[in-house]
Amino acid sequence: MSDILLNIENLEAWYGDAKVLHGISFGLKRGEVIALIGANGAGKSTLLRSICGLMKKKTGTISFDGTVISGRQANEIVGLGIAMVPEGRRLFPSLSVEENLLVGGNTGRKGPWSLKAVYELFPVLRERRHTPSTALSGGQQQMVAIGRGLMSNPDLILLDELSLGLAPIIIKDIYELLPKIIGNGLTAILVEQDVTRALASSQQFLCLQEGKITLEGEPQAFSRDQISAAYFGM
Amino acid sequence: MVWVNIIIQGILVGGLYALFAAGLSLIFGVMRLVNIAHGDLIVAAAFLSLAIVQASGINPLASLLIVVPLAMAFGYGLQRGILNRTLGKDILPPLLVTFGLSVILQNGLLELFTADSRKLNAGLIETASFPLLPGVAIGYLPLLQFAVAVIVIWGLQYLFYNTSLGRAFRATSDDPETALLMGLDQRKVYAWAMALCLGVVAIAGVFLGIRSNFDPFMGPGRLIFGFEAVIIGGLGNLWGTLLGGVVLGVAQAIGAQINPGWQLLAGHLVFLLVLAFRPRGLFPKVDG
Amino acid sequence: MNTTITRSTTASRVSAFIALALIAVLIVAPWWGTTSTLRLVGEFMVYLALASLWNLLAGYTGLVSVGQQAYVGLGSYALVALAMFAGIHPLLAVPIVGLAGVLVALPVGKLVFRLQGAYFAIGTWVVAEVFRLVAAQITAMGGGSGTSLPVGVLRAMAETKFWREASIYWLALALGVGALALVYGLLRSRVGLALTAIRDSEVASSSLGISISRIKYAVYVAVAGMTAMIGSLIALQKIRVSPDAAFSVNDWTAFVIFIVVIGGIGTIEGPIIGTIVYFVLREFLADLGSIYLLILGALAIVIMLLAPKGIWGYVAARWNISLFPTGYRVNEKD
């Protein structure tokens, strides 16, 4: 078993004719949490979407646990062990809390996560298990989205903007649970607008600016000014 | 007493109309597709049963064991092979392709079976009845047909709300892209939905053929009955569709009693009235 | 550098000239053609008109109607009724029939517009069915078997067979060319611009203040009126009306849809090409009866899946031609 779980080589991606990712290359070690930071439109979500198979127009190689996944369909990729918690949650409105979680477990992968385990992590969801997912608060919806991703027992979880649209106190609560979420040696890529929080929760980070990597490494190795410069492209 | 009889007959035939409609409702709910060939597929199922009955001599009701699986397989293939390619933002391709399919089915059936009017013979059950009240007899066949409609609709509801396939249908219908992230391939999900729809269509077709005469051109009429039942009952509500079928059946029965030439008109009139005054139907689901 | 903005292209100017020449030749056809020539051109005009109008509805306004036969039949019956019971000269009755079509479409449109997309389509079909069933109940017009245009009416149109045939033929020519001209004129106008905007993006265009529902409704009603007039022409051509023939889905909708889809939906040239293809195919395949329809159906499916823009759509995109330009071109000359 190699140490590198996810390897990306020279990834370039387009929305229509507009190129949004330029020559992205990096490797993610098993069990690592890597933060992906950058301004709006820098390409963070695009990168995650490329990994989980939602970007149609791309070149370059993405390999996961030794298998090349860059040409695969998104529904196959989740079966291989990558789960995506999408930006904006994207819960299924016709489904209840429990049904959303059950759909997350659709691939039937075995592992520590189950309905019971998710309810232990987020007890408030058990109380609201039959509520339509749209009737929940933003924070609760985020919990469902995370739980749904965990239900597929992934080896790599992609967390896209967990704090989007949430009140600060809710964000704090969710981040306090982060170690429990990515305990069990789960590898994670964390996309986050809140740079301080992102860097505090990760062992490595990547800074994107206009689709290119401008800085990478361990958070404590750089000063705030260096990170700002990379963030804003100065 | 005559009127009680009429209304009961209308209610029971409403079950058949609900069967016509159930498949339409299902497919629209899952993939926003309206299959113009739906009625023709019902008629084709009746003809398939006819062919099997003629070849083997078994009872048409028994032929369901063969017709339903065959129809489901056809539905799966039709969706994966052709209809999946038409889905998208534009409403024209699915409409025009299914319209072409409708024409092909009608003329194909015409070529294979001629324009002669046919009927499926189910034996004694067709005429057997039991008296409910003095002067009111209920036929076993219409009762069976209604019961089957209730069972099918109950079955579909159960499937939709209590099984993983049902969750897959609803999730894919909500958000096909996020459904991909759950491992759901929408091409397969839609194909299973169409397979299920054609299973119901097959049941509807066989009962149609037993109940009355049929010919290759009856399809559009059945599509219209199904469609009217869905609109009267309310979009997105299968039990509402059953009720819509019943309303339609009763309207037609009353119309026919007043004047035989008014049977269909009475049904259409009720449909138009519901459209005019309750455009969302009698029991719409609060749906997008 | 001298920049000019024009609306026409070389191709369109050439084809305009050819079209005018063709129309001139067709106008004098009663003198050089036989009865069957006149009949064929007359039928061609009927389908050309119906196809152009259906294309306007479905290809530009986004209203896919499977029930235009309601107005065709209405027009046929209205003409015969006006001639038989009100003694109106058939040619004068045609515009009245058009008005009748508009008046009927006003409430019908309100009703069917409560439905969307494919449900709208089936709704229009139901309306046509209702019209058909009602017509079959009118005993004064022959009930289910229909009735013929009285000989007296025909004789009142014109004294001799020659002039009768010529009048009906010129009416056909007028309606065929007229429908095409109406569609073209509409699409070149501001309404046409609005329609194209709506077709490209409903959300964007409504945010610009374009009242989508009003434009759609107006187009639906206008098309209904014209379709009714074509129905009255058909009654004159066939001299007979019956519920099943006048309100036939096959004749007035299925064939029309195939013509538009195969020719090129959403283009003005498409219906012309489609009608030509339809008549050519009919020449060779009509003997096959239902197999012919099977082929048409299969062809429509194949085209919709592989070349959704139809024959003209493919040609226009490949060679960048437009014979009926509705846009603007910037020409730069040094």
Image: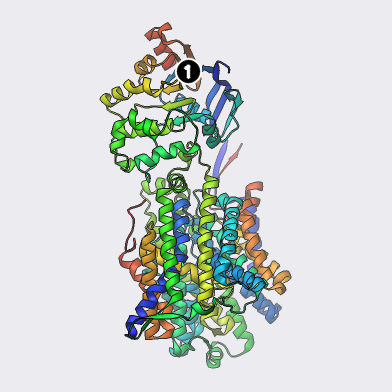
Judged left or right of residue C205, residue C54 is right
C67 up-or-down from A223: above or below: below
Report the front residue among B111 and A165. B111
Judged left or right of residue C95, residue A56 is right
What x and y, as percent, mark residue C316? 63, 50
Q: Chain of mark 1?
A: A
What x and y, as percent, mark residue C163? 61, 85
B204 up-or-down from C89: above or below: above
Please report the residue visible at 65 percent of the width from the left and 74 percent of the height from the top.
B54
Please report the residue visible at 50 percent of the width from the left and 61 percent of the height from the top.
B200
Q: Residue beneath label 1, please?
A: A31
What x and y, as percent, mark residue C117? 45, 57
Helix, strand or loop at mark 1: loop
Please report the residue visible at 50 percent of the width from the left and 56 percent of the height from the top.
C60
Whether residue C12 is visible here, answered yes or no, is no
Report the front residue among A232 and A84. A84
Q: Amino acid at mark 1?
A: Gly
What x and y, as percent, mark residue C329? 56, 45
Report the front residue among C27 and A52. A52
Please report the residue visible at 52 percent of the width from the left and 90 percent of the height from the top.
C153
Q: Residue furthest bottom?
A: C152
> The C terminus of chain A lies in which quarter of the figure?
top left
Judged left or right of residue A40, residue C268 is right
